[in-house]
Image (tube, grey):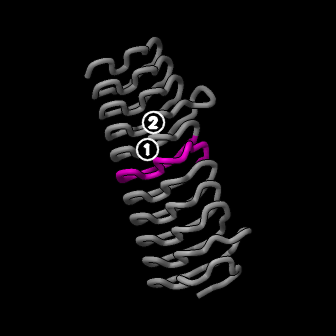
Amino acid sequence: GAYSGFNNTSGTRNTFVGEGCGFTNSTGIRNTAIGASALKLNVQGDQNVAVGTFALEDFVADTDGHGQNTAVGYLSMAEATTGTANTALGSHTISSGLLTGDHNTAIGYQSGLALTTGFKNTLIGSAAGDAINTGEYNVAVGYGALSTEDQFGYNVAVGAFSLLVQDAADNAFNTAVGYNTGGSITTGIRNTI
């Protein structure tokens, strides 16, 4: 497509298909971008996969060779800036936060939507963990699971709407398994239900 890989100077083994994708890549290697503006701002990041319009659009590696991100879906990781080794599958996954966190996995529409500096979160299901921005080591599986927590971590929510309104003022260490389990917990900690 027009302007894909436009600034590539010494980057090797890149694949850019779609208008403006890989536009600023100059030294990045082994990147794949498919879709308009996918991986558009990457300069030196390596081994990224961006499939979908605006996927990984704003990613710029903080150090030469950083990257290893996979973003598949419309706006998937669109606002990610320097995060490394993240996986986002689905439309709007990890898409509104300026992601600098590493090793996050988000699968499903708007899962991990607001992630910024959070790291090592696993979020599976539409809107799972969609408010988490700085939290870490959270696991949310199911529609709307752990959907209010934003800053803290060490929680496991398995089942639609489990730990739905939790927004603890500290790492909560809560575990909830089942539909709407722990659905009324707001700031409670160290619960297994």
Name the residue furthest bottom: 193
The quadrant holding residue 137 is bottom right
Q: CA distance from mark 1 to mark 2?
A: 6 Å
Asked if the stretch drawn in magenta spans residue 85, the answer is yes
Identify which residue is drawn at 50% across, 19% down.
27
- As rendered, which of 96 and 93 lies closer to the eye? 96
Image marks 1 and 2: residues in contact by CB distance under 8 Å: yes
Name the residue beneath numbered marker 2: 48
Q: Indicate the quadrant where residue 191 lies.
A: bottom right
Q: Residue at x 54, y 47 (%)?
A: 97
At 74% from the left and 68% from the top, the residue drawn is: 170
Magenta span: 83-103
Q: Amino acid at mark 1?
A: Thr
**Crowding near pointer 2: few (<14 within 10 Å), some, many (20+)?**
many
At a point 49% along the width and 24% down the height, the residue shown is 28
Location of residue 15 in the rendering, given as x and y in whole percent from the top left corner: 34, 27
Quadrant including the C terminus: bottom right
Q: Residue 32 in magenta?
A: no
> Which secondary structure lies at badge 1?
strand
Left or right placement of residue 31 versus residue 103 in this view: left
For mark 1, what is the residue?
70
Q: In the figure, 32 relative to 20: above or below?
A: below
